[in-house]
Image (tube, helix red, strand yellow):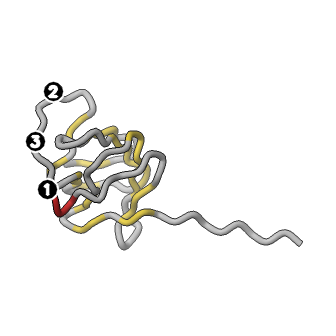
Amino acid sequence: MLLKPGTRLRSAVCDAEVVVVKGSGEHELTCGGAALVAVDADDARGEIDPAQADGTLLGKRYTDEGATVEILCTKAGAGSLALDGQPLALKSAKPLPASD
């Protein structure tokens, strides 16, 4: 699947919806073990892989190990995100500078 910033996708096995925030190129992006599809694709549902059912959280950003791709969750779901077979990690917030 060709990823580019602004691409809206949804899971084929749960309610999760995401937007690509950063990164581009040809990658396999999955949720719950199944490839993500376009938001406007038909509503055929598959079965979620129990090993990839850690869930996605609304409003949270997910990134790969090298921080080359960043995904924003716009609708929570039961499946967990993976890029090219590697699980995406929840991106932590940057600490604010201390005020004196």
Name the residue type under label 1: Asp
Residue at the image position 10 percent from the left and 41 percent from the top: 46
Q: Nearer the viewer, mark 3 or mark 2?
A: 3
Q: Nearer the viewer, residue 64 or 68?
A: 64
How far from the left and from the top, in percent, is residue 33?
Answer: 15, 55
Name the residue type under label 2: Asp
The residue tagged 2 is 42
Q: CA distance from mark 3 to mark 2?
A: 12 Å
The residue tagged 3 is 46
Q: Secondary structure beneath disc 2? A: loop
The C terminus, quarter of image:
bottom right
Figure check: 25 above or below 46: below
The residue tagged 1 is 49
Q: Residues within 10 Å of mark 2 (few under 14, many from 20)?
A: few
How far from the left and from the top, in percent, is residue 6?
Answer: 40, 41
N-term-proximal mark, 2 vs 1:
2
Q: Residue furthest right?
A: 100
Q: Quadrant of residue 22?
A: bottom left
How far from the left and from the top, in percent, is residue 29?
Answer: 23, 54
Q: Quadrant of residue 38?
A: top left
Name the residue type under label 3: Gly
Task: Check contact, mark 2 vs mark 1: CB within 8 A.
Answer: no
Q: Indicate left or right for 56 with 25 as reference.
A: right
Q: CA distance from mark 2 to mark 1?
A: 20 Å
Q: Nearer the viewer, residue 52 or 20?
A: 52
